[in-house]
Image (cartoon, rainbow, N blue to C red):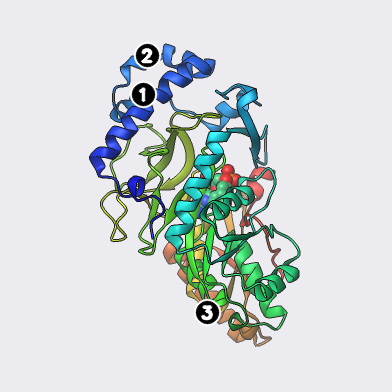
Amino acid sequence: MIWNPTKECMSRDQMHSLQSKRLQKLVTYVYHNVPFYRNKMQQMDVAPEDIQSIDDIVKLPFTTKQDLRDNYPYGLQAAPASEIVRVHASSGTTGNPTIVGYTRKDLAVWSEVMARCLTAYGVTRDDTFSVSYGYGLFTGGLGAHYGVENLGATVIPTSTGNTEKHIRLIRDLNISGIACTPSYALYLAESLEKMGLKREDISLRIGAFGAEPWTENMRKEIEERLGLKAYNLYGLSEIMGPGVSYECSEQNGSHICEDHFYPEIINPETLEQLPYGEQGELVFTTLTKEGLPLLRYRTKDLCTLMEGQCACGRTSVRMGRIVGRSDDMLIIRGINVFPSQVESVILEMQEFEPQYMLVVDRVNNLDTLQVQVEVRRDFFSDDIGRMLNMKKRLADRLKSVLSISADVKLMEPSSIERSQGKGKHVIDKRILK
Ligand code: DLL
């Protein structure tokens, strides 16, 4: 099923002309309503009339998270305060949070794009859907919530916390779909097992997972343990929240809601646009947003874009999995390492739980990487020979994938802290020193 075939299956020519029209309108809007953009455009000697088609987007300035922080709280907001009906704030460990105001129309677009996602996953009005992203300033909870309601399925706003009660509701209310982070899905699976329940005791069939990077191996693990089909859901607060892109039944990349969010991939060093198929930093322009419209927002997310009609019938550009964020990328002894590479290796081996932590340090001016990983209960033993062998096999495999050696530390079952929101997988002591 397709929620909005007119928009999701539009010909490329029609999409190009719709995007062009919307970009022209957007540029005029921000030029007149956001001094930050007017100044930037004047410095670059670009006027709204110079933007005739979506291809002219390269003439426009980029926006960064730092720009949002520098203009905290409302400096980049384009709509008057009286038009803003909701505010979310993005998480951030340092500096000012990013404040995102939505007009009534923005919220309507958001629940429209979320309904597209859920429909692509196979959710129907007959489903009962648990939203277990955090409700509050984080966009995950309310964003998914209104999408489920718009589609007409039943929403259960479980949020995070109280996992046992949640599992009882999943069982007793025949909850068939769930939206949460992949980390929380695993935590749920573990809690289910601890309660002595099996996946056959519940009837989850669809999962909408996102808000953090996850791998194909993680998908298999979650599907296996919860007995559902796991789909990718991508988004970010600055652009809207969840619903920017979604997987369909083909699961060959995530379809971008391109009529609202125009994607580009750039080389993060030179800032030049890269062709489809090349990996780089993902950039979005919000084509229809009123509250906080952004030109060429640099997400820091690294991935590729793909063109071409999908077997599902949708024509939109798709994005590959996020391999990591440029600010997640660790540089260890000069080599780029992403936590997702480690996750993938760990999950290839049946001995390990998908629970791991990368501890990076600098000893005598040399970077060190320790990979702490939990051994599954069935494989944990006091047979030292067996444990050493397991450790060596993981270390060898990590070395061949990462091109640097890592010290593997085998951890007891349930010893690494679980997350109900976005998982934490890195401790970089070099920064703390
Ligand atoms: O995480 C919005 C969201 C909520 C998306 C629920 C999906 C589901 P932020 O907190 O602003 O917003 O974080 C955005 O999270 O730039 C990516 O680095 C990462 N991210 C989000 N979805 C995915 C995904 C929400 N499916 C940042 N795969 C983004 C990988 C993701 N990374």
Image position, residue 29 (x, y; %): 46, 20
Element at badge 2? Answer: loop
Measure the C-alpha gap from mark 2 to mark 1.
11 Å
> Is the CB–ligand 1 distance for label 2 below 8 Å?
no
Q: Which mark is residue 350?
A: 3
Look at the picture and state if 401 lies above or below 27: below
Spot occupied by residue 15 in the image (x, y as percentages of width and height): 30, 39
* Number of residues whose C-alpha sits closer than 10 Å to that of mark 3, classed few (under 14), some (14–19) or many (20 or more): few
Looking at the picture, does residue 93 appear above or below residue 96? below
Displayed quadrant of residue 374: bottom right
Which residue is disc 2 drawn over? 47
Residue at 65% of width from left, 38% of height from top?
89
| Residue 319 in the figure: left or right of residue 218 | left
Amino acid carrying mark 3 in the image = Gln
**Where residue 274 appears, x then y in whole percent?**
31, 39
What label does residue 4 carry, if any? none
| Quadrant for the N terminus in the image | bottom left
Give the number of the disc on residue 24: 1
